[in-house]
Amino acid sequence: MELLLLSNSTLPGKAWLEHALPLIAEQLQG
C-alpha cells in the first residue's frame, strides 16, 4: 500500500510521510 501511495502521490515528501506513517504504524502494530 505504501508503494502505491508513493507512486500516485503528487504531494511533497513531508506531506506524504505525515499521511503514510500512521498507516505503516497500524500495519506494524497488527
Image: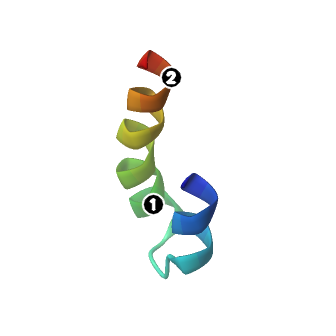
Q: Position of residue 12 (x, y in %)?
A: 48, 71
Q: Mark 1 points at which residue?
A: 16
> Tag 1, which secondary structure?
helix
Q: Please, which residue is most extreme toward the front here?
A: 30
Give the vertical position of 4 relative to 24 (above or below).
below
Q: Where is residue 7 in the image (x, y as percent from the top left)?
A: 62, 74
Q: Earlier in the sequence, mark 1 or mark 2?
A: 1
Q: Please, which residue is most extreme toward the top here?
A: 29
Q: Position of residue 29 (x, y in %)?
A: 43, 17
Q: Where is residue 11 in the image (x, y as percent from the top left)?
A: 44, 75
Q: Which amino acid does label 1 sit on?
A: Trp
> Tag 2, which secondary structure?
helix
- In the visual, does 3 lie left or right of 30? right
Which residue: 36% across, 53% down? Answer: 19
Which residue: 58% across, 66% down? Answer: 4
Give the vertical position of 11 relative to 6 (above or below).
below
Q: Nearer the viewer, residue 4 or 18?
A: 4
Which residue: 39% across, 61% down? Answer: 15
Q: Name the residue under label 2.
A: 28
| Mark 1–mark 2 CB contact (< 8 Å) | no
Quarter location, residue 3: bottom right
Give the vertical position of 28 relative to 9 (above or below).
above
